[in-house]
Amino acid sequence: MSQKDPFQPTDDAARALARRLIDAARFGALGVLEDGAPFVTRIALAPGPDGVPLTLISDLSVHTAALRATPDCSLMVGEPGPKGDPLTHPRLTIAARAEFVPRDAPGRAALRAHYLALQPKAHLYVDFGDFNFVRLVPRSAHLNGGFGQAYRLDAADLGPGPQT
């Protein structure tokens, strides 16, 4: 007896929900490999100008060294609501590859301004020498829209976010 595939066919509603979760995320759970073992941490987050999740992380953090050693990572976004079972609220888990933005990269000033518009408290540390912008470029994703609403998405399904 074969097991039924738990994933629904990916449709425009699933794509739109995934995009909304990315665009609304101001924090997420980042999973990395640290010395070969799984490690998860909470990070500040914003959609970049191109819609790719963007974070600002310190060289002093365990996850920064882990991403430099192994750029493959996982990011989960989505907030549980104030009431009820947290598992009924939508969440998106993205398989991504971390891309560190060089300090002298063209467009870094615009990226900085964009990030600070969405994460204004980062003004306190954005220019510290140990902080780096990192793009978390999606490869694929799993969307759980609630019970019985699971979807597999590829990078193209996530589409670009709004240009600002």
Image (cartoon, rainbow, N blue to C red):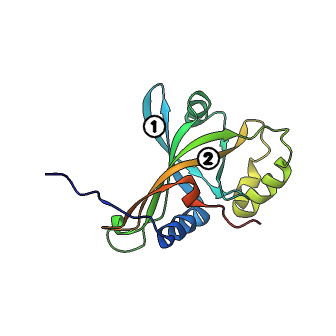
Q: Which mark is residue 39?
A: 1
131 and 95: which is toward the camera = 95
Residue that appears at 41% across and 61% down: 151
Residue that appears at 75% across and 63% down: 117
Residue 118 vertical position relative to residue 44 in the rendered view, above or below: below
Q: Is residue 33 left or right of residue 160?
A: left
Q: Position of residue 38 (x, y in %)?
A: 42, 35
Q: Which mark is residue 136?
A: 2
Q: Earlier in the sequence, mark 1 or mark 2?
A: 1
Question: Which of the two marks, 1 or 2, is nearer to us in this view?
Answer: 2
Quadrant containing the C terminus is bottom right
Q: Which mark is residue 100?
A: none
Q: Is residue 124 left or right of residue 156?
A: right
Residue 16 vertical position relative to residue 110 in the rendered view, above or below: below
Circle 1 SS class: strand
Callout 2 amino acid? Leu
Gap in Å between the C-alphas at discs 1 and 2? 16 Å
Few, some or many C-alpha atoms within 10 Å of disc 1 (few <14, some 14-19, many ≥20)?
some
Residue 86: quadrant of the picture: bottom left
Callout 1 amino acid? Phe
105 and 120: which is toward the camera = 105
Q: Position of residue 54 (x, y in %)?
A: 66, 51
Residue that appears at 56% across and 53% down: 155
Q: Position of residue 109 (x, y in %)?
A: 85, 50
Question: Are discs 1 and 2 less than 8 Å apart at CB?
Answer: no
Q: Position of residue 7 (x, y in %)?
A: 34, 60
